[in-house]
Amino acid sequence: DKGYHGYDDTGNHVITPYKGRNKPESQKDANRNHARLRGPGERAHAHLKTWRILRKLRCCPRRAGRLAKAIHVLQNYELAG
């Protein structure tokens, strides 16, 4: 978001939206494109936060990722059936 600036955990530069008011149209377009890319990730993160089992999970990130995938498969199976 606009409040963040810097680098991620791996040391890679993170691209953030342009700040301030009265930006030129090119910067407004860049911010809109940035929001379009970021939106699905934000919604997915919000959805993951609703899964109770992940709230107090204390394990390695790889195991948490596998668990999240399994929950997602089961949830989609339940919705389809």
Image (cartoon, grey):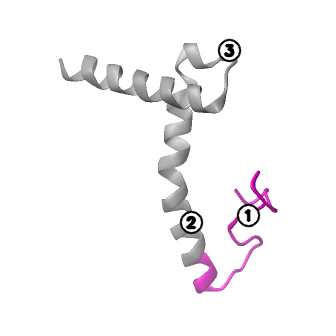
- Who comes first in sequence, dot 1 or dot 3? 1
- As for residue 21 lying within the magenta part, the answer is yes
Kindly indicate the quadrant of the structure image that contains residue 2. Answer: bottom right
Residue located 67% across and 21% down the image = 59
Task: Identify the secondary structure beneath mark 1.
Answer: loop
Which residue lies at the image location 48% right of the left edge and 61% below the top edge?
36
For label 3, the residue is 56
Q: What residue sits right under mark 1 in the picture?
A: 12
Name of the residue lying farthest toward the left: 81
Q: Position of residue 33 (x, y in %)?
A: 51, 69
Kindly identify the residue that appears in the image at 56 percent across and 37 percent down.
Answer: 45
Residue 5 sits above or below residue 76 on the image: below
The location of residue 57, given as percent across then percent down, is 65, 17
Query: Would you identify the image quadrant in which residue 81 lies?
Result: top left
Image quadrant assignment for residue 7: bottom right
Query: Dot 3: what SS?
Result: loop
Amino acid, disc 1: Asn
Q: Earlier in the sequence, mark 3 or mark 2?
A: 2
Instruction: Residue type at mark 2: give it.
Output: His
Q: Residues within 10 Å of mark 2 (few under 14, many from 20)?
A: some
Secondary structure mostly taken by the magenta-highlighted segment of the chain: loop
Residue 34: mark in rendering:
2
Where residue 18 sits in the image (x, y, percent)?
71, 72
Amino acid carrying mark 3 in the image = Lys
The one nearer the camera, 62 or 23, is 62
Alpha carbon of mark 1 to alpha carbon of mark 3: how far?
29 Å
In the displayed structure, 2 sits above or below 29; it is: above
Read off the magenta span: 1-28
60 or 51: which is nearer to us? 60
Find out whether the residues at labels 1 and 3 contact each other: C-beta distance under 8 Å: no
